[in-house]
């Protein structure tokens, strides 16, 4: 029963936290708490007035990306036999047509016009074997998972819309044409199935080899290491999450590369909005460094053409930075911002007394900022690090990534973009993200539909 005046949480959370054993345990723990007025005042004093640019320099187009996933038992009576489904959407919003979406009276989005915008969204789907499902006769779920990842990343996803879109090609391209699968310490390369050391270097024209030791196919996409978390009977949710995260960023890279090759000048008229931090976590994390290098290369060329750098904004709706922002917001005046440098992050958010020399060394390719708009809503946005790589002294890198001057016009352009899309309708989200999110969200599907997908993609059930 909820206490008087309390609403029961989803998991009976308030009862549980009131348990004296839990209270005693928490007293011995460090965790993020509501800051005292003095602490909050000290934090708030480090914010400065948020910059604003020329509204006429807003991008002409915004690409918003979002992803969702579901992993479901294929049948109610086989709860441990799962199949995973990932859906990633990129939605292209023309700023002109966005303006037409807004009802001038209410300032709210017209739902009928928004629905029309959905039809311009491109969703790419992936189906993956989960627990107890072996794909294409593979000897283990893991080897089948590798086959499924390769087959689906190696497929042309352009939907007949002109230029080819093959994500495994993008993977080779962002690696400067050569991808080696195996431990980085192993010069030869290593088979992901039997661990034997052989040369597993891949190029655009050779994306599949056979292991001379075990005869298993080895794929260029094994470089992402997504299969490493997959087991025959375990829950493979984390592998699906990693894959979704990696695909979302790979698609961003693909789109930027395609536009860059077609006309680099077009990029300076666009903004790209990602849902979440500019980071790739877990097994495929090293992809973050390749995307960082790609963006730096593109920006170098844009600078030669006397054009502004790419505006890529990661927006985080949840997580510890947003928790902190929400606790702090009432102490902040409207219209302020702050770079989330490592010192601030470790002191006020992480609460760690052993901070790393460079937060996010293995995962992040973008810097976080906090921004409270003039209307009083708080956002956590990220911009790509303006460097080609993280080599050298990590403390120096940590300093450089937090130097406002290194971001040029990007901070004011990001703030302007958020201001432009900010609407009371959405909590800490801007409209394209919300649109993409709704487009990509997957409801739990009835078993029959999941079986349809299995049939369509050639996933075979065990006899
Ligand atoms: Zn092998």
Image (cartoon, grey):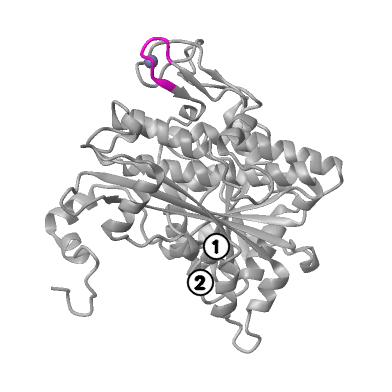
Residue 277 at what x, y percent from top left? 52, 49
Quadrant assignment for ligand 1: top left
In this rendering, position of residue 344 left or right of residue 447: right
Q: Is residue 213 magenta?
A: yes
For the question of whether residue 109 can be seen, the reply is: no
In this rendering, position of residue 267 left or right of residue 453: right
Residue 349 at what x, y percent from top left? 44, 50
Callout 2: few (<14), some (14-19), or many (20+) C-alpha neighbours within 10 Å? few
Q: Which residue is mark 2?
A: 426
In three-dimensional space, the C-alpha distance between marks 2 and 1, rounded to whole angstroms, equals 10 Å
**Is label 2 in contact with label 1 (beta carbons under 8 Å)?**
yes
Q: Residue at x 46, y 47 (%)?
A: 347
Q: Which residue is mark 1?
A: 433
Q: Which quadrant is home to the C terminus?
A: top left
Is the C-beta of the residue carrying label 2 under 8 Å from the nearest atom of ligand 1?
A: no
Q: Nearer the viewer, residue 349 or 175?
A: 175
In this rendering, the answer to whether 67 lies above or below 235 is below
Residue 155 at what x, y percent from top left? 53, 39
Q: Residue at x 50, y 16 (%)?
A: 200
In this rendering, the answer to whether 141 lies above or below 19 is above
Quarter of the rendering containing residue 305:
top right
Q: Nearer the viewer, residue 128 or 309?
A: 128
Residue 460 at what x, y percent from top left? 31, 39
Q: Residue at x 22, y 52 (%)?
A: 75
Q: Please state the extent of the stretch shown in magenta in the rendering.
A: 211-217
Give the SS element for disc 1. Answer: helix
In this rendering, the answer to whether 162 lies above or below 54 is above
Q: Residue furthest bottom?
A: 105
């Amino acid at each position: 029963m909820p206490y008087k005046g309390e609403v029961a949480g989803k998991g009976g959370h308030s009862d549980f936290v009131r348990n004296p054993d839990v209270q005693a345990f928490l007293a011995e723990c460090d965790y993020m708490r509501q800051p005292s007025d003095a602490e909050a005042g000290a934090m708030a004093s480090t914010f400065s007035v948020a910059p604003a640019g020329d509204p006429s320099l807003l991008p002409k187009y915004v690409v918003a990306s979002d992803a969702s996933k579901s992993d479901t038992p294929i049948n109610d009576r086989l709860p441990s036999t799962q199949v995973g489904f990932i859906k990633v959407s990129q939605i292209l919003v023309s700023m002109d047509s966005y303006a037409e979406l807004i009802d001038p009276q209410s300032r709210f989005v017209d739902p009928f016009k928004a629905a029309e915008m959905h039809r311009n969204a491109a969703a790419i789907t992936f189906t993956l074997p989960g627990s107890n499902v072996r794909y294409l006769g593979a000897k283990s779920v893991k080897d089948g998972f590798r086959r499924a990842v390769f087959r689906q990343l190696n497929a042309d996803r352009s939907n007949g819309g002109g230029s080819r879109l093959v994500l495994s090609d993008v993977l080779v391209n962002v690696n400067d044409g050569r991808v080696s699968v195996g431990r980085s310490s192993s010069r030869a390369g290593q088979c992901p199935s039997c661990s034997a050391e052989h040369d597993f270097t891949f190029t655009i024209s050779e994306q599949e080899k056979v292991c001379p030791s075990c005869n298993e196919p080895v794929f260029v996409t094994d470089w992402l290491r997504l299969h490493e978390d997959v087991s025959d009977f375990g829950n493979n949710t984390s592998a699906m999450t990693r894959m979704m995260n990696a695909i979302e960023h790979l698609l961003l890279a693909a789109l930027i590369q395609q536009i860059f090759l077609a006309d680099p000048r077009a990029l300076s008229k666009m903004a790209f909005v990602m849902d979440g931090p500019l980071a790739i976590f877990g097994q495929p994390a090293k992809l973050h460094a390749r995307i960082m290098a790609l963006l730096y290369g593109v920006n170098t060329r844009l600078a030669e053409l006397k054009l502004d750098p790419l505006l890529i904004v990661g927006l985080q709706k949840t997580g510890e930075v947003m928790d902190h922002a929400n606790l702090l917001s009432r102490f902040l005046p409207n219209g302020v911002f702050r770079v989330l440098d490592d010192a601030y992050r470790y002191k006020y958010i992480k609460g760690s007394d052993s901070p790393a020399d460079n937060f996010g060394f293995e995962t992040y390719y973008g810097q976080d900022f906090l921004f409270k708009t003039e209307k009083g809503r708080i956002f956590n946005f990220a911009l790509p690090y303006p460097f080609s790589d993280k080599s050298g002294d990590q403390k120096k890198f940590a300093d450089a990534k937090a130097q406002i001057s290194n971001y040029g016009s990007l901070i004011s352009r990001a703030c302007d973009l958020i201001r432009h899309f900010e609407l009371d309708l959405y909590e800490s989200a801007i409209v394209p993200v919300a649109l993409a999110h709704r487009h990509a969200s997957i409801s739990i599907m009835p078993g029959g539909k999941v079986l349809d997908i299995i049939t369509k993609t050639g996933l075979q059930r065990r006899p």
